[in-house]
Amino acid sequence: MAVLVTRPDEQGSALCQQLHDVGIDAMHQPIISIKPGSTLSGIGQALEHFDIIIAVSQHAVNFTHEAILASSSRWPKSATYLAVGQKSAHVLSKKTQQKVHYPDISDSEHLLRLDVLQNVENKRIVILRGNGGRELIFDTLMQRGARVEYREVYKRENIAFHSELLISLWQDNNIQQLVITSLEQLNHFVSQFSEIELDWLLTLTLYVPSERIMQEAMQLGFKKVINTYSASNKDLLTALRSTETGQ
């Protein structure tokens, strides 16, 4: 039994290596690429005007940090920092040298339950994200009276692939599990397959990081979907090992 990992670039390669290290076969098939976003210019100076800074991912932290360093700026010390996931929070705390709040379960709904986001009327909040996503955070904080802006500090670009060539390769390598970590990636991945190919794809055990993605996957026809409650490689590895060992 082997795992197909669709995470981009280093994250996907790292997860595959971690799986190999514990005796689980894995193949890497990135379906998106990550590049700098269009609003990185002047990000260091812009962040100084916000009371609360929210990073949705490690990519958001890393691209912002590189732009800040390039402009000889610094992360603000007076802002309150939040991240959607524990790993992103760890990276953000390391870069900013500030405390970072994050939810126990890495999704928008649980982030919005944090005490620090309950009384935000007239607070200026920026969401560091890619090209789209996290609208629930934006809309909810606006409803709570905050002044919210997006900064698209990175962009995701879909990678097309020839499913008819890869299906045989994956079947020959006994792929039975699949890791997809965003709704956008899920929809793009499924769109690349013919109806006949989908008959096989939908039999795979799918691992996703949130309830929302799990529900969408089930509507698409996946028979077995496991919610890992986190997109970190550590938690994905734990879930995959648990399935492998039956514990």
Image (tube, grey):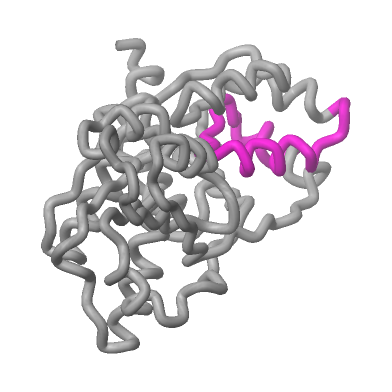
Which of these two is toward me, 159 or 136?
136
Residue 27 appears anywhere in the view: no
Left or right of residue 208, residue 126 in this image: left
Which segment did they paint magenta? 168-196
- x, y percentage for residue 176? 58, 25
Question: With 238 as the anchor, is 205 left or right in this view?
Answer: right
- Asked if residue 215 is positioned above or below residue 67 in the image, the reply reads above
| Front-most of residues 229 and 103 | 103
Farthest right residue in view: 195
Q: Residue at x 63, y 51 (%)?
A: 31
In the image: residue 84, left or right of residue 199: left
Residue ID at (12%, 52%): 99
Q: x, y (%) of residue 245?
A: 33, 16
Query: If the image is split into quadrants, where does the C terminus sit?
Result: top left
Residue toward you, 114 or 241: 114
Asked if residue 188 lies in the magenta stretch, the reply is yes
Would you identify the image quadrant in which residue 116 lies? Answer: top left
Question: Residue 12's spot in the image, x, y percent?
Answer: 46, 50
Please say whether residue 4 is one of the residues in the magenta stretch.
Answer: no
**Quadrant of the image occupied by residue 228:** top left
- The structure residue drawn at horizontal position 52% and vertical position 54%, both measured from the top left corner, is 8
Q: Depth check: 36 or 112 in front?
A: 112
Q: Quick check: 73 left or right of 223?
A: left
Q: Is 64 placed above or below 234 here?
A: below
Q: How many marks?
A: 0
* Residue 65 shows up from this direction: yes
